[in-house]
Amino acid sequence: MNPRIVPPVFAAGLALLASASTVAAFNGSTTAAGASAFPNARKSVLLRGMAAAEVREILGSPETVKKMDAPGAEIWTYRRMIDHRYRFVSTGVQSVPVTAAPGSIAELQWINEPVYAVERRSVYVVIQLLMLDGKLVLAKHQQEEEASTDH
């Protein structure tokens, strides 16, 4: 197999590009905390036909390795957080009792007030590499987003 550089999966940050048949050329994407999502990304580029050891040196150990039916075929999956944010969101309205100004003879009144919660939102890049007989053959990627709210 004649190794060649293949199109980039993403450039820094959230710029995710390419189709399901691309192999990554990572250039140091960092997480919201500033740490590199792929530790040796600035040092190397992934190439078709690259040995498994070289891929591990660039991306680290995969989160999962799934054996395929074909002999010598595996799917390596990497999932790295590339962004993490917090924000306040309104989750509803509650009625709150209020009294009129001091000295007033008005009775207790009820007003509607928004209820807020903290929403956590994380963005991940998920990369799956098809390894055949210890060589990189194909890759696909997707972006996943998770959100949760504390009530």
Image (tube, rainbow, N blue to C red):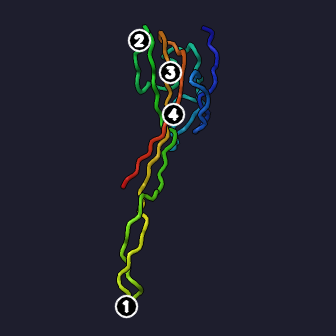
> Horizontal and vertical percent for residue 20?
56, 24
> Horizontal and vertical percent for residue 132?
49, 11
Query: Which secondary structure, mark 2?
Result: loop
Foreground mark, 2 or 1, reads 1
Identify the residue at image location x=63%, y=21%: 6
> Horizontal and vertical percent for residue 85?
49, 48
Mark 3 is on which residue type? Answer: Leu
Contact between labelled residues 3 and 4, with CB atoms less than 8 Å apart: no
**In this picture, is 34 found above or below 75?**
below
Label 1, residues with CA under 10 Å away: few <14, some 14-19, many ≥20 = few
Mark 2 is on which residue type? Answer: Asp
Q: Nearer the viewer, residue 86 or 45?
A: 86
Identify the residue at image location x=35%, y=85%: 107
The answer to which of marks 2 and 1 sits earlier in the sequence is: 2
Where is the C terminus found, in terms of image quarters?
bottom left
On residue 125, the disc is 4
Mark 4 is on which residue type? Answer: Val
Query: Which secondary structure, mark 1?
Result: loop
Q: Nearer the viewer, residue 89 or 92?
A: 92
The answer to which of marks 3 and 1 sits earlier in the sequence is: 1
- Residue under label 1: 105
Is residue 47 left or right of 63 when viewed as pictured?
Answer: right
Foreground mark, 2 or 3, reads 2
Query: Which secondary structure, mark 4?
Result: strand
On residue 129, the disc is 3
- Residue under label 2: 69
- Mark 2 to mark 3: distance in Å? 16 Å
Identify the residue at image location x=49%, y=17%: 130
On residue 135, the disc is none
The answer to which of marks 2 and 3 sits earlier in the sequence is: 2
- Mark 3 to mark 1: distance in Å? 74 Å
Query: Which secondary structure, mark 3?
Result: strand
